[in-house]
Amino acid sequence: MVIRFADNSNHSLPSLFTVVQCRPMTVKTTHTIAPGYEPISGYRLEKKIGEGGFGEVWRANAPGGLKKAVKFVFGAKDAKRGSRELKSLERIKGVHHPFLLTLERFGIVNDRLVIVTELADGSLEDVLKRHQDRGSCGIPRAALLSYLHDAADALDYLHGSYQLQHLDVKPGNLLLVGGHVKVGDFGLLKDLREIDHSVIGGLTPIYAPPELFDGRPSINSDQYSLAVMYQELLTGTRPFAGRTIAQLATQHIHAAPVLDSLPAADRVAVARALEKDPERRFESCKDFVEALRTPRGREGTVVQTTTKASVLTRQEAVEDLPSLQSRCAIFHGRVTGHALVVAVGGAGAECLHELRSRVATLHSACPLDLHSVLIDTDMNAIHAARLAEASDRIPPATILHTPLKSAQQYREGRTDHFRSLSRRWIYNVPRSGATEGMRPLGRLAMVDHAKSIDTGLRESIDHLAAVCGDRVPSVYIVGSLSGGTASGMVMDLAPRIRTLLDEAGLESASVLPLLSTVSLQGNPHQPLTLHDSHAAVSEIGHYMLPENSYPGDSGIQWQGVPASRNPLRNAYVVVDGDHALPDSCSAAATIVDYLWVDATGAGDLLAEARRSDQADAGMLAKPMLRSVGVSRLKCVRALEENLLAPTTARHLLLRWLGNPNESRQIAGLTAERLRKRCGLDVASYLDEAKSPFGQDSDAITRHLSDLISRIPVPELLEGTKITRLLKETLSECDVLHRLDRRAATQMVMLRREISVRMHDGRIDVTSSVQATEGLMKWCNDAVQELGQFRLDLRRQQDEERKKGASQQNLEMEIESVEKLAMMELDVIASELAAEQLKAFTERVKTLHETLTKMAIRIAQAIRCVPGDNRDTENPWEEMPQEIQMRFNPVLEDLHSQTASTWLLGPLRDSKVEWDEQAMAADLVAKCLPVIENVIDSHRHSSENLTDTSTSAAAALTHESEMTNTQTIPVSRDTNTAQLVKTGICETQTFERKPGGNSLWTEQTTIESALQVASPPLLHCGGRQRLLLLVGSESERERLEPKVSAAHTGSLTTVVIPGVTPILVHEAQQIPIDNVLEQLDLVSGGNTQVSKRLHARTDVDWKD
């Protein structure tokens, strides 16, 4: 109920309050509630100050000239609302506290519950409105905390002294009296000692804790509402953005709160107060307010009044998200940033080694101040990291060796701090002393060395906080989920690092876990890695659910972390490439490249790319993973990209389109073949129409004779009687439906026949268009023939009736009637057949329109293919003989790759949207790798020959490694040489480290780069976004059009001075359930092994 105050501020006033005294009321006769009315003797109503669906609130002049508030609750005896409030008043009447609004008296008057309270000056709802009207986002923090302290004091008094919960804490129920807040309106007040705690009716869903939707209030329910209200009053936004009761209920129960608008120092406390499990919240409301009043953060935190809008998403298996803000962003400078990298295990050590090497190479020009911690059980990795520090250019790292002890040592030592671990792991450590890929042993090492790990992390974070000043550092956790050390430790290290950052005043610093996993194809030599990955991903999914906070570990004094603050919610899982393939990208390379660009210039952009819209309530309860792919660009291959590939694509499109002159010559023959293949003929329609009477003429005659025998003799020659009986029989047999089904089947066969012929290359689109025109002409001719057939039958019927009327013999008369009936059946059947042929013609017309559109689109796509659009010239013919011979196989290969999508797709679904440019670009992109193989094979074979006749061909396809130039032999054909003049042969190269095999591969084509950058986890579904990072405007101008042409989705291009051109393929909202199913599939479905690899036993993982 909305209640308005009497003064000029238009305050709103809730209704029910604490008792000072409870005097019996004087019950008066029925009276209209109006000014001057005295519901209680001495309390004269002055002005209505609020009303709602359940009652009204009036300002009243009380004895002694005091002003009071009088509330009327209608239907007090029968209505649930009045009964509930009356019960609440009985509970509260003996409670006294300075911050509980004073209740003077209450009772039933004329079937109305009447409540008299002190008159407040306003509510926090009104205070918020006044500040927002002045342009502020909310109430100043100091004043708000003072108000909340009063409310928390009153609520804790109710909880602690009386086991009562208010259950309707909201801004409108916190009333201002004399500069302090008093808690009012106890309509939902609940005694927690009662067995029945149902309290669904009357709650305010915006502020209601999740347990109230289940009807199970808790001692900490009011604290949750207080936290929701705090964010709203401070920032003007709420942690849950639902607009309907259903949306709010879903979000309160399943969704993590959105705390971005809060100061970073407040997020820790608010996140804990908004825990789904009441037991994980603060012990009291005052504890919550005190945590806000004494934050661990640094000074100068400012409330953000605006937040960046999330990118809206659509509901598709893999959806391309729009580009970020403008299509091209430019960073004009690079500022040195601070980053802390916590590397765990062997994979983490590999990443850290590369990062430290990069910093050492750049030395004073490095844009990154790298802080790092290495945690590993392997002494070799620790030793290698320490040796690297021999160079003064290598940034120092905190190196923590966490070796496993022997099983005997664990048996003889204390084990009380191992309560969260299974004893079978503690007492079965391998003799090698290594984890041997078993996750629980990695966690055993972490727990055993928890004190040294905690000390090392704390010192590194404190140092980071001291040197980064006002700048917010980036924090990363890198490691592998497929081994023993990192996979077993990271589930605890991630929330622990979050806690240590919060304690150091770095609440604003984000923690980004970048975790690798083995290829989803598995490694037959290391089958345990897949089971490790399965167990680890399952645990990440557990912690992603809003109700599953990190529980901490009492054995090592690591406290819990609310689910909304757990860094694992934003974990990236990067799938390792197949190292047997030369172009396969390693997970370590992806993680290092992504981390580097994130920490050295593109951090804000990549943070925006990670944002996702969580408005879909159906997805809230499903844990989702992130992944990323990165690909370094090297050069664009001029010959293949600018000459042969476009030509191949253009010739394939021309083959799909067909030649109108040639098609016209064979159109009649093609239409006749299609008609026969579909079984389309007039006789079949007539037979189908007459089939209820029999399958041959004798059966039909017998059926008609039987039908005529039912007609009285005087009515035999009446044609209307026979016609009616025939139509009734056909109707009873549902002949129309059978004819429709026949026509639909023939249409399906026609589409399928055309599709198969197109797929096999036996027919083109133009021929199909002309063939359907022939079919439509045949149908129209057949309809005309049926019409003439009916006219002939009508003439024959007239003659037969005249002849029958002159017959004196009954037997001959019946014979005449049978002939008339047979002719009438033919007339009706021809009418039905004609109608079906007309309908079939309309269906063919629709197909004809689809094919016509296809022809137009293909013709337009031909013009979209880059390069020379002259159809008569084929540069393949000017290539060496070995290359010329591969043209037709390449054309067939391209057809097999693309026909299903671009040629046959519109036939399957006529509503498919066409994009001619995307079609042309896709064809070019698909054939590029094939043509590259052809050119490379020829080049390699030519290099082994000494004959001068083949050396020119080798030079023709030789790819120069020089930047922005290429050596062109004089013998090159005119078309290819022209490319040099127009600048098409320019290439972009990148410096490669000399010596040794590198996991960092550079792609030589845009198409291969896009393929390498695509995260393999997208096969499990999700959403994606592509970014192109380049080091200069000239690189942007050269590379952006090529990437846009090869990539069908949106593209965000960013210029970061000096950066190596790189593609970043962001993937988000990948269903973890799908990833686990894939891991089950490739690991043989043996989930029992995966379950045994869970790293702790005190958590119900619910596999």
Image: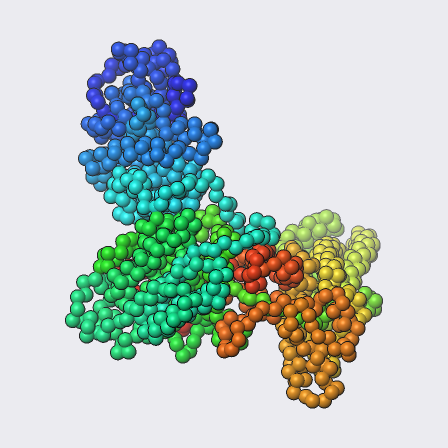
Q: Quadrant of residue 518?
A: bottom left
Residue at left offset 75%, top offset 72%: 976
- Looking at the image, what colour scheme do you see? rainbow
Residue furthest bottom in the image: 946
| As drawn, 307 above or below 1040 | above
Pinpoint residue 175: horizontal percent, then vertical percent.
Answer: 33, 27
Which of 510/72 is in front? 510
| As drawn, 263 above or below 765 | above
Pinpoint residue 1043: horizontal percent, then vertical percent.
Answer: 62, 61
Which of 920/779 is in front? 920
Q: Quadrant of residue 270?
A: top left
Q: Quadrant of residue 682?
A: bottom right
Residue at left offset 49%, top offset 73%: 999
Residue furthest left in the image: 412
Pinpoint residue 196: horizontal percent, then vertical percent.
Answer: 25, 40
Name the image quarter holding the N terminus: top left
Q: Is residue 981 in view?
A: yes
Residue at left offset 51%, top offset 71%: 1000
| Left or right relative to 727: residue 141 | left
Q: Is residue 679 in view?
A: no
Name the image quarter holding the C terminus: bottom left
Q: How many marks?
A: 0
Pinpoint residue 350: horizontal percent, then vertical percent.
Answer: 42, 70
| Left or right relative to 863: residue 364 | left
Residue at left offset 28%, top offset 21%: 117
